């Protein structure tokens, strides 16, 4: 995995490289090789040249910030960008509890400051069969987990999103979903180097509609696993209940790894609509990759498991 890192004191890339230059640079580099586990923005620590595939250019800021799901702010893809301005992201506290040696209520700055910030470009695949390529900024989820010192008995980590009816206009939806939104990962999944805690996008601060101020990204899983606006992390021995797996278990499972061979009960997952504003219809149809293209990095996590069964 090749990434670009920076100290917290470094000048953000958003103040150096405009979005158009960012994309053009990736087009130029794309002439040479295929994309790896994480696409990258400069050279690795050993000085190796960076590369990406020409058809894996990142989506634009506008596409990423105006086409997404955040049901606490509405059901339409554009609703979060219209409504999430009501979300107050400072101050922000994350509760860490459960089976760990260092539980507590941590200010956002205490989560971020000890870690090295990294820019990573990941594929993002929604369970609804649309996708993007997104340049996130964040730090490894494993950093926070190690600092919490989970007990040997901890096998999972559960997450909860903020639920505040005063800030979130879709409070009328509460009986259908049962807020707050909840997600979870097996601990080895959460500790994997590709699992990221995100606080930025395109080198800028993460917008409210995309899960500010802190969200998870697990790029080989369907997007709903990458929980937004996190206020709680809980270490557990048993598999934690998660919102969609609890709400409609016949359609959404706990693992929800991207798998083109396992259809959703209401649609195929074999292909996806890549959001692409340069096209006449604003998208193009492409084949879905097993584990979203990250199989070389993460398939070993599921050895011995029937991935047709463990959706």
Image (spheres, rainbow, N blue to C red):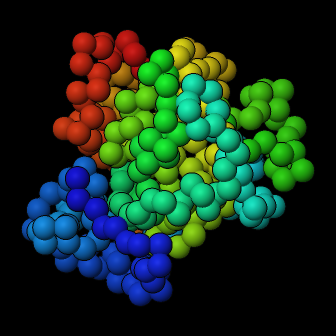
The answer to whether residue 218 shows anywhere in this view is no
Q: Position of residue 6 (x, y in %)?
A: 38, 72
Residue 263 position (above or below residue 144) = above
* Residue for point 72% across, 56% down: 92
149 or 159: nearer the eye? 149
Q: Position of residue 137 (x, y in %)?
A: 45, 63
Q: Position of residue 224 (x, y in %)?
A: 54, 38
Q: Seen from this angle, which residue lies furthest front?
A: 101
Q: In the image, is 114 to the left or to the right of 74?
A: left
The quadrant in which the C terminus is found is: top left
Q: Please tell me in which quadrant of the rendered image residue 271 appears.
A: top left
Q: Position of residue 305 (x, y in %)?
A: 30, 14
* Residue for point 67% across, 41% down: 104
115 or 83: nearer the eye? 115
Q: In the image, is 226 to the left or to the right of 285?
A: right
* Residue for point 76% across, 33% down: 179
Residue 272 position (above or below residue 166) = above
């Amino acid at each position: 995995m090749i990434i670009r890192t920076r100290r917290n004191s470094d000048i953000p890339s958003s103040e150096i490289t405009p979005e158009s230059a960012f994309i053009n640079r990736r087009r130029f580099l794309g002439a040479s090789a295929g994309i790896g586990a994480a696409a990258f923005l400069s050279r690795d620590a050993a000085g190796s040249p960076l590369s990406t595939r020409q058809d894996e250019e990142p989506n634009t800021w506008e596409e990423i910030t105006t086409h997404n799901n955040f049901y606490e702010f509405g059901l339409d893809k554009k609703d979060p960008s219209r409504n999430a301005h009501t979300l107050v992201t400072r101050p922000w506290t994350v509760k860490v509890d459960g089976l760990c040696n260092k539980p507590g209520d941590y200010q956002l700055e205490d989560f971020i400051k000890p870690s090295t910030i990294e820019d990573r470009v990941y594929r993002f695949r929604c369970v609804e069969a649309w996708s993007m390529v997104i340049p996130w900024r964040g730090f490894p989820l494993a950093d926070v987990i190690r600092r919490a010192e989970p007990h040997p008995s901890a096998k999972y980590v559960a997450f909860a999103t903020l639920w505040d009816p005063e800030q979130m206009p879709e409070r009328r939806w509460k009986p259908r979903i049962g807020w707050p939104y909840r997600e979870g990962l097996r601990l080895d999944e959460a500790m994997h180097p590709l699992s990221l805690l995100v606080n930025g996008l395109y080198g800028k601060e993460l917008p409210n509609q995309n899960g500010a101020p802190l969200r998870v990204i697990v790029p080989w899983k369907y997007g709903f696993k990458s929980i937004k606006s996190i206020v709680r992390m809980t270490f557990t021995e048993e598999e934690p209940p998660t919102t969609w797996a609890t709400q409609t278990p016949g359609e959404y499972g706990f693992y929800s790894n991207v798998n083109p061979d396992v259809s959703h009960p209401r649609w195929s997952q074999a292909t996806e609509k890549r959001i692409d504003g340069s096209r006449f219809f604003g998208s193009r149809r492409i084949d879905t990759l097993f584990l979203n293209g990250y199989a070389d990095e993460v398939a070993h996590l599921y050895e011995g498991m029937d991935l047709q069964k463990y959706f």
